[in-house]
Every structure is written in structure tokens, then in C-alpha cells.
Amino acid sequence: MDPNLQAIVDRLLAVHQDRVELDAIGEAIGTLAIDTAGIEAILDAIEAAGRTIVAPSGGTGIAALRKVVPAARLLSKELGRTARVPEIAARAGLSEAEVRQALLLAKVMSR
């Protein structure tokens, strides 16, 4: 695993003994440019260490996901490629952090 990704995983595992919220993962990633494979690697490593990944309480992740998915699909059609986080954020009216967290939630939900 990439050393930057491993450092993120190590910090999360040191702080969270049983469950790791998606918000914590999003905060740990911060502004690092991590592709889908990197996110998968982080999630796999956390789960391999015996931790459960959970969505944040309050349902804000689902609300953001409902904005992110249509925006990403529309942008992909318009641009002819996968939309980037800043583009999705601008179209959905969300911050880049909110978009990243919504995308993490989608990854976890698809597992």
C-alpha cells in the first residue's frame, strides 16, 4: 500500500478501536488526491483490521449522496469522462469535503 494511504489507515486504527465513521475517514483523507483504488485500499485495510465502517448519524450523508449522484452522472454525460470532485461539488452546491464523504458512503453501501 502507498505510504500516504498506510499513514491514514494507521492514524484511523490508532484512534478508533471498534468502528470508524465515514466522516473520520473523510477528515483523515482531507485534501489528498486519492483515486477510487486508493479509497478501496483504505476501506479494505480498515476492515481487515477488524473495524466496522459506519455512516455518520443524522442522515446528512444520504442527503448529500442524493445530490452527488445525479450531478456526477450529468457531468459525465456532458464532459464525456468521469467528473472530478470539484466539478461535482460546484454542480451539486456542496463542498468538496461533502462530495468526498458522499462518495465514500456510496463505496461502503456498495460493499
Image (cartoon, grey):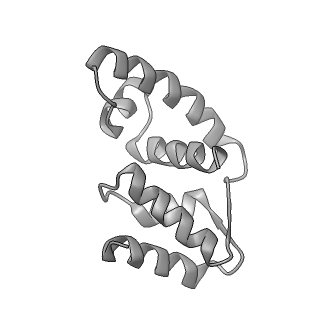
Rendering quarter of residue 65: top right
Q: 44 or 98, which is in the foreground?
A: 44
Rendering quarter of residue 110: top right
| Residue under the point 40% across and 54% down | 37
Rendering quarter of residue 16: bottom right
> Residue 109: horizontal and vertical position, in percent?
66, 45
Q: Could you tell me which quadrant the N terminus lies in?
A: bottom left
| Residue under the point 48% across and 80% down | 11
> Residue 13: horizontal and vertical position, in percent?
56, 80
| Residue under the point 50% across and 43% down | 103
- Give the total number of marks visible in the rendering: 0
> Residue 99: horizontal and vertical position, in percent?
46, 41
> Residue 34: horizontal and vertical position, in percent?
34, 56
Quick check: 18 left or right of 92?
A: right
Q: Is residue 108 shown above or below 44?
A: above
Q: Is residue 12 shown above or below 108?
A: below
Quick check: 104 left or right of 76?
A: right
Quick check: 82 left or right of 26?
A: left
Quick check: 77 left or right of 41?
A: left
Q: Which residue sits furthest bottom?
A: 14
| Residue under the point 63% across and 69% down | 47
